[in-house]
Amino acid sequence: MKFGTKAIHAGQEPDPSTGAIMTPIYQTSTYWQKSPGDNKGFEYSRGTNPTRKALESCLAALENAKHGLAFSSGMGATDAVMKLLSPGDEVITGDDLYGGSYRIFTKIFSNYGIKFHFINMNDAQNVKQYINQNTKLIWIETPTNPTMQIVDIEAVAAIAKSNKILLAVDNTFASPYLQNPIDLGADIVMHSVTKYLGGHSDVVMGALMLNDDDLYNRLWFIYNACGATPGPMDSFLVLRGLKTLHLRMKAHCENGSQVATYLKTHPKVDKIYWPGFSDHPNHDIAKKQMRDFGGMISITLKGADLQETYRVASSFKVFSLAESLGGVESLINHPVSMTHGSIPKAERDKVGVTDNLLRLSVGVEDIEDLLDDLKQALS
Ligand SMILES: *Cc1c(COP(=O)(O)O)cnc(C)c1O
């Protein structure tokens, strides 16, 4: 099955009891057993629920994976992966990460004796020098948030494999429409489903997709034991959102390309970060591993201090100033004071997350209205 067909149908059959085309919202915590243990595969909804199960099958299909696990947030999914580790283990990860990932690594899991190396991954070979016998996991994000750096997934996967290290990829920014890390050799794909997969800014959810049965069983044990699993209503909303993922992503990419092109020569814009430009440092890798370049764009404002950046960020009429991304509506974000506030200033400055940086999540509104809004806000 091709992508759009899977987005609409994977994991979903007409309801056997009524013929309902849409997967019902099985709003139940528990299930009847004829005699102890004699049930229809569902016992208690922390571990299994039919609406969530349909969603997990669909999510797995979209990443060309065998298994899917849905969590009550992206951070819940990340947390489960980290619980595969033990004290003394080491993790290699990027130096330009989602702020919440940086926070859970440094403020939670560091306290449990896990060591993290935050490194530049523009050159995948850089990873090798941080590997030792304690290295158990490589965690990458590409494109990175917010500076849209591209990490070569296939190259990192080859290094991970030859050293028997797990590779997990946070694929939130690309979505499975643009990039499938498992096809490139990753072991686990993580998503903040809250973003493009849900797509309508009405659900917080996370997911893991993977192939290996043994790893799935270990992660399912953590998922059920720790309990950060989503309810049936949210599972239904995401199933519904997924049905237009391919249509939305196509529109995000088209609008993203036009907005990026407009901003590139704008006199108020200093730097622009978007992997679709041929002068982006890893454009060739983006072209190799992604099917298009997406609707996430970051810019720095020429000569703007914090005050002026706040003024611009607050003067949009179609774009909304808000955290998050990937919904149908266009959003603008000031990473330093919003999504990346939990990263120390020295660390932020090193990777270009400066006071005058703004991040755009280009939505699927009419492009003329988006360009007009940028024009007036940057005037
Ligand atoms: C939002 C986000 C997360 C966290 O997901 P939540 O659903 O907010 O918990 C992780 N990684 C990236 C890249 C994100 O954008």
Image (cartoon, rainbow, N blue to C red):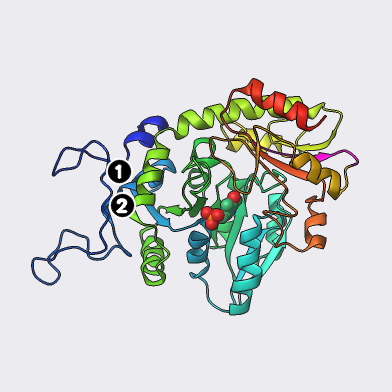
Q: Quadrant of the C terminus?
A: top right
- Read off the residue under disc 2: 53
- Read off the residue under disc 1: 11
Residue type of the residue flagged with mark 2: Lys
Tell me if 338 is positioned left or right of 209 in this view. Answer: right
- Is 189 in front, or is 109? 109
Label 2 residue SS: helix
Q: Is residue 86 above or below residue 124?
A: below
Q: Residue at x 69, y 65 (%)?
A: 117
Query: Residue 133, can we see it?
Result: no
Residue 315 rendering spot, x and y as whole percentages = 75, 37
Query: Picture quarter containing residue 216?
Result: bottom left
Residue 135 rendering spot, x and y as whole percentages = 60, 68
Query: Picture quarter containing residue 102?
Result: bottom right
Query: Residue 13, can we see it?
Result: yes
Q: Residue at x 73, y 48 (%)?
A: 334
Q: Disc 1 and disc 2: Cα gap in Å?
A: 8 Å
Q: Badges 1 and 2: C-beta atoms under 8 Å apart?
A: yes
Label 1 residue SS: loop
Indicate yes or no whether the magenta region holds residue 302: yes
Q: Residue at x 42, y 39 (%)?
A: 241
Q: Residue at x 47, y 28 (%)?
A: 247
- Is 109 in front, or is 213? 109
Residue range of the region highlighted in magenta in the rendering: 296-303
- Is 279 in front, or is 196? 196
Q: Is residue 349 above or below residue 83?
A: above
